[in-house]
Image (cartoon, rainbow, N blue to C red):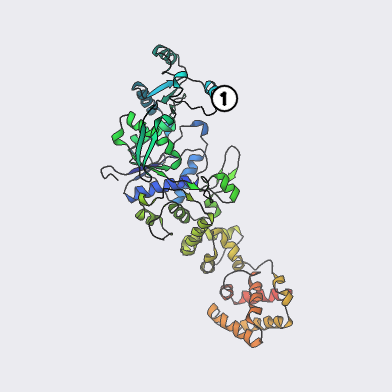
Amino acid sequence: MSSQKKVRVRFAPSPTGGLHLGGVRTALFNYLFARHHGGDFILRIEDTDQTRFVPGAEEYINECLAWCGILADESPEKPGAFGPYRQSERKPSYRQFAEQLVKDGYAYYAFDTAEELDAQRQLQPNFRYSHENRLSLRNSLSLSDEQTAELLDAGTPHTIRIKMPEEGTVSFEDMIRGRVTFETKLIDDKVLLKADGMPTYHLAVVVDDRAMEISHIFRGEEWLPSAPVHILLWEYLGWANEMPQWAHLPLILKPDGNGKLSKRDGDRLGFPVYAMNWTDPKTGDLTKGFRELGFLPEAFVNMLGVLGWNDGTEKEIFTIDELIAKFSVDRISKSGAKFDFEKAKWFNHEWIKNMDNATLTPAINSILMENGIINADASLVQNVLLVVKERMTFVSDFWAQSSFFFQAPQQIDVDAVKPKWTAEKTAFFEQIIQEFATVEHWDAPTLEPFFKEKVAASGMKIGELMMPFRIMLVGGKFGPDVFLIAALLGKQEVIKRITKALPLF
């Protein structure tokens, strides 16, 4: 990495819908690189394609990044010295560069209508506007200077296209992939400026990256085919010495490894691929996100951080500060990373398990209130959380794992033990109610030997009585250690639940 240029990186999403986890990972890797090198992370909204613009998408992107803790140093919401940070607001800056490219012989005016181009596609299914056919189409290369001037003076709609060289190669050093080379004759003449005066991605990204003094470009592998066009634009505009370093990130693959992970795959396999819930404003369709499913932002970021990157050890759990400290481009994989939803859930489980109660408590209190528990005892909530969080994959699992601590079970799974129920067992539990009333130190270390001693005295086996005891307290064959449950419920509640359940057996 050059030491002469301050690190400035950017994440430049289009406001066209939900934010795919691949996009979040691109933002994260940009952010980690910037923070590791004491640089700046810029959020730029690439809204040049007005036909695909979706209301609310920009706000959604901001909320996703904020939830993840990926905070921009400069953005539309936090302008710096290199604004504006929406491409649509930079529109006047692009035409001059497109016109300069035409003047210097690196681009040309194309007057073909959409209908004419559609007709060409009908004739040639694989039609591409290139050196092979440009002279047979309606543009300033095939027309005379006079004809071109007349069309321009008449205000004839036109685009400006790059004139790709017929021969030669474009090579560059990718920070992840090493030397990458393209043959220019295989690349079509991309539109740089559209008929509405808006730039395409190809022109805008180069002009903006230069204007914003971007030093390193981290973007998805899908942009690799566009790289030679962008590199030529840097050169044609006379900015070759200012060109950023490039890094094309490997794809996030489907769980089976066959192709890029898509929203459709998530729908098919039953897991989210968006960071947060996204509702399409046109159709009203809801696409679920990791946040609403119950992922902690720390776990989501950790999972993405090691998806295609590692620190060279077996370590998998990282805070964002640890990721920043450890991040290096040479540890990014060259090949795609398979997405494993079970592994993603494991990250969330590990984070919940190791997170301090104070951080989890606000979400837990919300869950309790949603389930009608308005004034839960604060110390009980804390103690229950300590007992059940190792059993939680998502924060939302808290209620399923702990509801019986806050309200008596509505259903008692009597059928689980009734076939082997005896009068002796009824007598045992009638007796234990009396015995429990005499216990002074009501805690798990006292209750467990006490209960086992009474079982031994009865002549029955512990296994015959532990299960019914659990079912009386929680309603079924689930939950943490039964003596921890009894201790947290308290003496009176335990006696009350046994008394109420016993006649059902």
Q: Residue at x 34, y 32 (%)?
A: 234
Q: Which secondary structure lies at badge 1?
A: helix
Of the pair 332 and 320, the residue shown nearer to us: 332
Of the pair 231 and 7, the residue shown nearer to us: 231
Q: Residue at x 60, y 85 (%)?
A: 453
* Quarter assignment of residue 418: bottom right
**Amino acid type of the residue tagged 1 in the rendering:** Gln
Q: Is residue 90 at least partly visible in the picture?
A: no
In percent of width and height, residue 163 lies at: 40, 25
In percent of width and height, residue 116 lies at: 53, 20
Q: Residue at x 30, y 46 (%)?
A: 1
Residue under label 1: 122
In percent of width and height, residue 12 lies at: 42, 40
Classify 217 as above or below 381. Answer: above
In percent of width and height, residue 69 lies at: 43, 51
Left or right: residue 269 compared with residue 330 = right
Q: Residue at x 61, y 38 (%)?
A: 283
